[in-house]
Image (tube, grey):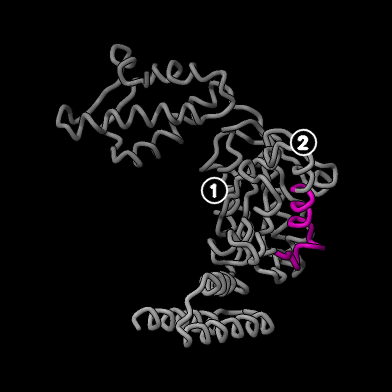
Amino acid sequence: MAGKEFLFEELKTLNKKVETTEGLPIDLKDRLNEMIERLERMANLGHYASEFDTLSRYIDTVASIPWTAETKDNLDLENAKQALEKNHYGMQYAKDRILEYLATLILLKKRGKEAISKSPILLLVGLQGVGKTTLAYSVAETLGRKFERIAMGGIGSTLELRGKSKAFPEAEPGQIVKALIKTGVKNPLILLDEIDKASGEQGLRMDIMAVLLEILDPKQNVAFRDHYIDYPVDLSNVLFICSANNTGTLSAALMDRMEIIKMPSYTDNEKLVIARDYLMPKILENSGLSLGELEIDPDLWPGIVRPFGYDSGIRSLSRTLESICRKVAKEIVEGKTKKVIINADNLKYYLPQ
């Protein structure tokens, strides 16, 4: 009896979710209600089968899609300029191009035109660690949009983008629909990160490129069909940004849809400023340290940065600073000191081995 009551409670929850989902298309809602009736018959008979799980999971997923929920764009170019300057050192060319792109979006929106569909897809091209992801995040922050990153390097087949049909035991929606559900809005900014790393096999890669083209093409993405959802999902309000380390493996058709923004590697001097003025304050805060508890001799910064001269980005440098802060945090917690001053004599001890 307890099991039967549990099934009816689950059905009650599902039914409420379907009824309260805003913007759920009528014909899709009818389909879900038919499924709920089917589940009710199963529960009345006391039958618990794998089909119950399959159907209830599908209903829950479809009712979780944000069919109408959206955030309002912040159309303030000056605010965008300040945010980019605050979050990113250097990269003037990339920042200028981003501002031009945002200015076009703002102008189209203010004049009541379809901004997203008329704008090209930005493709940020640069080596690992040069700030492609953080730049995309800054665009989302500037516009006031929810942000989600999809790591294309982990995409091995089109099914991971398009979903797996509910006819299969491992059925689930694709990464695009998952991103909509996770952000809870129909107009997030989705970063398709490192699209050049999608499936190493030539045939599969071309298939993935074809699906990407469908996702990014405004003529097609108004009715994107995820195999699991099996119903058109409108992606036309999503702002997509792509990134790549290089463009050699990208299809010509996909490249035609893109506007490339090249992001050069950082110089040692730029890394020094980024490490000292941008990374360190954040890492100190994340480590639980205050500015007064760790002091680094200003003359040491070139020596800390220089070992990573071969590294185009700042990931390795960031990990080094995190390691230093953790070591200092440990000493403070153990009561060995209240403040650490890193100088030429003790630098080697604090640097990760």
Residue 17 image label: none
**Amino acid at pointer 2:** Thr
Q: Is 118 rendered above or below residue 9? A: above
Find residue 238 and report its image quarter.
bottom right
Label 2 residue SS: loop
Magenta stretch: includes residue 210: yes
Query: Which quarter of the rendering shows the N terminus?
Result: bottom left
Marks 2 and 1: in contact by CB < 8 Å? Answer: no
In magenta segment, residue 32: no
Q: What residue is rendered at 34% in x and 80% in y?
A: 2
Q: Which residues are magenta?
A: 208-226
Q: Dot 1, how many residues are within 10 Å of its Cα: few (below 14), some (14-19), or many (20+)?
A: some
Disc 1 residue type (three-letter) = Ala
Task: Give left or right: position of 32 versus 330.
Answer: right
Which residue lies most toward the top here? Answer: 345
Instruction: Give the residue displayed 47% in from the left and 27% down from the top.
Output: 317
Instruction: Judge whether 199 appears above or below 70 on screen.
Output: above
Q: Nearer the viewer, residue 24 or 330?
A: 24
Identify residue for label 2: 249
- Spot occupied by residue 172 in the image (x, y as percentages of width and height): 59, 61
Q: Main secondary structure of the magenta part?
A: helix
The alpha-carbon separation of the residues under discs 1 and 2 comes to 33 Å
Q: Residue at x 78, y 48 (%)?
A: 207
From this view, report whether residue 169 is shown above or below residue 300: below
Can you tell which mark lies on residue 83?
A: 1
Q: Which corner quadrant of the image does residue 244 belong to?
A: top right
Vertical placement of residue 131 versus 163, above or below: above
